[in-house]
Amino acid sequence: MKKWYVFILLLLIVVGGGIGLTLNLDADESGIREESSPVTSSDSLFIQAQSENSFQEELSARSDQNSPVDIAVIGSSVAEGQGASEYSQTWPSLLESSLNESAQGVNVTNFAVSGFKVSDLIEEGDVDELIQSSPDVILFETSVINSYYHDEPIEETNESIRLAADKIKEELPNAYLVFMAPNPISESMYSVVTSDLDFEEYVYETEQFITESGWNYFDSYTAWNRQMEEEGIDLDSLLDDGTHPNDKGYQMWFDLLNKAMVQA
């Protein structure tokens, strides 16, 4: 009889342990899935803050006020338009022309500065100058090409983005703010940089920070890469010097932005 009691006791221990192990494994798997879930499940490259209108809805609402919509652009040289044959060929100028042709009166003012990181835009007063102009819409290119080239720690890059966003939201609470990634750069440029992070890591680390902070974001970097892959386009054919888009590159940037944000 004792043998049967011992056998039953051992059986209960084994079965109970197995159940506990299964429950723990399920809990661990659930935790892993939760931690690795993407920032957004949408395939859209314009990641919209949940509490805000779409870009097109915002333009339409502000156009109904019978005055031109003031759009401010800020960022680095690829927002300024370096590499284009003339400013009219840059994505900010192409956007302004397109919106005005569609009867949505807009004025686009460019505050971007070549060579600047976001921290430079804050320290040198360019963000303040933008704020003083009281734009309705702000398109903020993240300037991470320069963060990468200057080996800026990613924590400092993200902190500068936070400071800029907080400053804009405090001074212009009704402005519609959209951050956007820069264009890809040629692999030939990687050899001149000693950064601890790859350029792509700067792009995706700042994207995650921006979207998790609840701000609008256009992933132009991925948009470029997808378009090049779909059409079999070589990146260097879209760049003037390995970093800055040429006229063809800026046209593609505008087309992608227009499709993702204006026509969506």
Image (cartoon, rainbow, N blue to C red):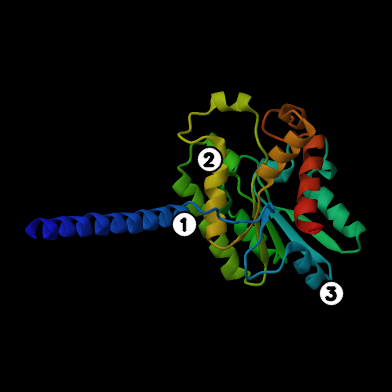
Distance from disc 2 to disc 1, alpha carbons, whole Å, reads 22 Å
The local secondary structure at tag 3 comes to loop
Q: Quadrant of the C terminus?
A: bottom right
Q: CA distance from mark 1 to mark 3?
A: 42 Å
Name the amino acid, label 2.
Glu
Any part of residue 84 in sight: no
**Amino acid type shown at disc 1:** Glu
Q: Earlier in the sequence, mark 3 or mark 2?
A: 3
The residue lying toward the viewer, choosing from 68 and 53, is: 53
Instruction: Give the secondary structure at mark 2.
Output: helix
* Residue neighbourhood size for the residue with mark 3, other residues' Cα within 10 Å, grouped as few (<14), some (14–19), many (≥20): few
Q: Is residue 215 above or below residue 64?
A: above
Left or right of 77 on screen, residue 95: right
Drawn side of residue 250 relative to residue 169, left or right: right
- Amino acid carrying label 3: it is Asp
Q: Residue furthest front?
A: 1
**x and y, in percent, of residue 157 in the image:** 50, 48
Q: Which mark is residue 34?
A: 1
Mark 2 vs mark 1, foreground winner is: 1
- Location of mark 3 (residue): 64
The quarter of the picture where residue 68 lies is: bottom right
